[in-house]
Image (cartoon, coloured by chain):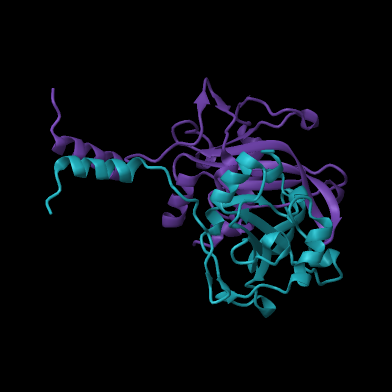
Chain colours: A cyan, B purple
Amino acid sequence: MKLSMMSIAVIFLFLGFSPAVEAKQYFKMQDGELQRPEGYREWIYIGTPVTPNDMNNGKAAFPEFHNVYIDPDSWKHWKKHGEFREGTILIKELVSVGSKAAVSGSGYFMGEFIGLEATIKSKTFFPDEPGNWAYFSFSAPDHGALKATATAFPTESCNACHAAAAKQDFVFTQYYPVLRSVQ
Amino acid sequence: MKLSMMSIAVIFLFLGFSPAVEAKQYFKMQDGELQRPEGYREWIYIGTPVTPNDMNNGKAAFPEFHNVYIDPDSWKHWKKHGEFREGTILIKELVSVGSKAAVSGSGYFMGEFIGLEATIKSKTFFPDEPGNWAYFSFSAPDHGALKATATAFPTESCNACHAAAAKQDFVFTQYYPVLRSVQ
C-alpha cells in the first residue's frame, strides 16, 4: 500500500492535535499486587503533615514527615469537579526528621526518605472496599529498601480512621491546602 | 502560493516533534519588580521545613510550614547537571499550622496559605548579587491578600544566612530531599 501525502498529513494532524480519549491510569496492578509507583515526585504535591517521633513517645504511627501527592489527571479532575475520579492514586512518601534547628529557627527539617505508601480509588480493582479505596505500603522494616510490590491492607487496618476522621471521601483534605485551594 | 502536500507534512512534523530551542523562563520582571508567580503549585515540590510559632517564642521568622517548589525546566537542568541554571526560580509558600493533633498522632498539620516568597538566580537581572540570587516576598502584614508585585530585598537581608548555612549555591539543599535524591 502506498500512502498519499494527504494521508500522511492527516496522520501527523491526528498524532499532534487529537485530545486524549481516555484519562491515564498512574498505577499498575498485577496478580493482585500494586507495583511500586515511580515518577510521583513530579506529580502534584498537596501537603505535608509531620508527626515526629519525639511528639509521639518515640514511635510515631507514620514517621515522620508525610509528603502527599496526587496523580496529574486526578488533579485535573479534582480541580474541575471537586471529587476524586475513578483511578485516583495518592502517594504518601515518608521522610525522617533530619534536624530540629536551622538558621531559620527551631522546628522540623527533612532528612531522608524512609517509606512509601499509596491509596487508590478503583471500583474495578476494589469493588468491595469502602469508597473503593485500598491502601498499600512499600515501606520495609527499619527503613530499608522499599518493596517492589504491595498487597492491599485488610479493610479495617486503614479504613477505620479514614472513615471516622477524613473530611471528604476518605481523604484527609482538611490537611491538604493545595486541594482545598481550588474548591 | 500553493503549499504542496509534502510541505504540509513537513510543517506538521516540525510542529509536533521539534525540541524546544530555548528553556522557558517561569518569572516576569517588569520595571524592576517581580510579578507574583502563578501556577507554581503544579511545579516540582522539593521539601517542607516547618518552624512553628510555638517553637519560636510565638514569632517564627518564617511562619510556619514552608512548601518549596522549583520550576520545571530548572528541575530538568538540576537532574541532569546537579546545579541551578540561569533563570532558576524557587518558590517558598508559607502555610499556617492548622492543627497539632490528628488520628495519625501528634504533630503539625497544615492550615491556610499565609504568605509567598521567591528567589531567582539571574545574571541578567541581578548581576551584582552573590551567586546572582535575589529574594522577594509577596506576603502582606497580618497574612492578608498577597501583593501583586515585589522588589528584591537588600542583599544583606537574606544573603547572610544563605551564604553562611546553605549547602549548595545559596540554597538549603540539605533540607530538600527531592533535590538530593537525584544527585
- Would you say residue B19 is visible in this rendering? no
Q: Is residue A116 above or below residue A172?
A: below
Q: Is residue B182 above or below residue A174?
A: below
- Would you say residue B1 is visible in this rendering? yes
Quarter of the figure that contains the N terminus of chain A: bottom left
Instruction: Give residue B37's position: percent from left, percent from top.
Output: 57, 33
Q: Nearer the viewer, residue A138 or A19?
A: A19
Image-quadrant location for residue A135: bottom right
Q: Is residue A121 left or right of residue A173?
A: left
Instruction: Give residue A100's position: percent from left, percent from top.
Output: 76, 59
Q: Is residue A116 left or right of residue B6?
A: right
Number of dots carrying numbers: 0
Q: Is residue B49 left or right of residue B26?
A: right
Q: Is residue B84 above or below residue A52?
A: above
Q: Nearer the viewer, residue A174 or A2?
A: A2
Q: Nearer the viewer, residue A85 or B178?
A: A85
Residue farthest to the top, as pictured = B31
Q: Residue at x 53, y 53 (%)?
A: A42
Image-quadrant location for residue A172: bottom right
Instruction: Give residue B108's position: percent from left, percent from top.
Output: 80, 54
Q: Is residue A140 above or below residue B147?
A: below
Instruction: Give residue B178's position: percent from left, percent from top.
Output: 57, 58
Quarter of the figure that contains the C terminus of chain A: top right
